[in-house]
Image: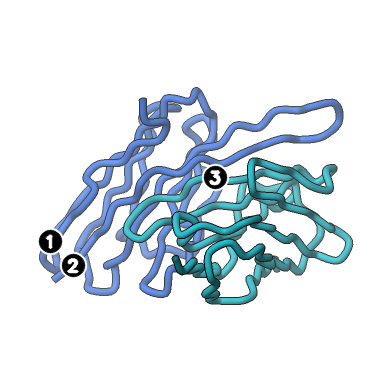
Amino acid sequence: KQEVTQIPAALSVPEGENLVLNCSFTDSAIYNLQWFRQDPGKGLTSLLLIQSSQREQTSGRLNASLDKSSGRSTLYIAASQPGDSATYLCAVRRSGTYKYIFGTGTRLKVLA
Amino acid sequence: DTAVSQTPKYLVTQMGNDKSIKCEQNLGHDTMYWYKQDSKKFLKIMFSYNNKELIINETVPNRFSPKSPDKAHLNLHINSLELGDSAVYFCASSQEYYWGASLNTEAFFGQGTRLTVV
């Protein structure tokens, strides 16, 4: 059974810091891993998608890495800004299924 | 244009009522989903349809019945609503394609429907 865990559950940092969010999964048989952002009361916005054959993806100040063998992904946010404050979710798509399994989320607050 | 749109955005109703939530995607995707986000913000899959065919049916009470009239629409009907049904319900869609030997896919989510049962 695939389980996805995110650490830390909550994080508060001053503006300008570089930070790392962690996602771990128990079953390495995945098609891909997707990082999402969720603002309070809003839907999910896709940030980065890493296919199982890839090691990392970058978009602006965001960089996501994937290590399937160890069941880990990290989301690196450079030079954090107050606008980055949101809940960050990772989700894995299990191989052989259409099912996306979500992590527990990291609630990020960037202080001005 | 909104890629995945849900209606209504908010729904407040009394226990015992029957209600529906509608979802439409204009991405041309073959697969659509319903997810439930509970009070602890945990997202869990409920149903999935691929080309109008039910492919995922998690342990969900029979009071919940999805319907997919066509590939672009997936509606969720809930009978005899209970207090515990209060949550945010998200619709999503995805499309699978092969890049060489690798299966590529990406999920897109709607804005959610906040259901409150009183």
Dividing the picture into quarters, in which one does residue A21 lie?
bottom right
Q: Which residue is mark 2?
A: B117
- Judge depth for marks 2 and 3 and give the one in front: 3
Quarter of the image for residue B94 reads top right
Instruction: Say what secondary structure mark 1 lies in.
Output: strand
- Determine whether, in the image, residue A67 is placed left or right of residue B38: right
- Identify the residue at horizontal 55%, vertical 52% (top origin): A36
Q: Amino acid at mark 2?
A: Val
Asked if labels 1 and 2 touch by Cβ distance under 8 angstroms, the answer is yes
In the depicted view, which residue is nearer to us: A33 or A98?
A33
Residue beneath the point at 55% across and 75% down = A11
What is the quadrant of the N terminus of chain A in the image?
A: bottom right
Colour blue, chain: B
Query: Is B51 rendered above or below residue B42?
Result: above
Q: Secondary structure at mark 2?
A: strand
Quadrant for the C terminus of chain A, please: bottom left
Which chain is mark 1 on?
A: B
Q: Which mark is residue A46?
A: 3
Disc on the earlier residue, 2 or 1: 1
The image quadrant of residue B30 is top right
Look at chain A in the picture and name its colour.
cyan
Assess whether mark 1 and mark 3 are in contact (beta carbons under 8 angstroms): no
Residue pointed to by mark 1: B13
Q: Determine the residue located farthest toward the right in the rendered image.
A: A69
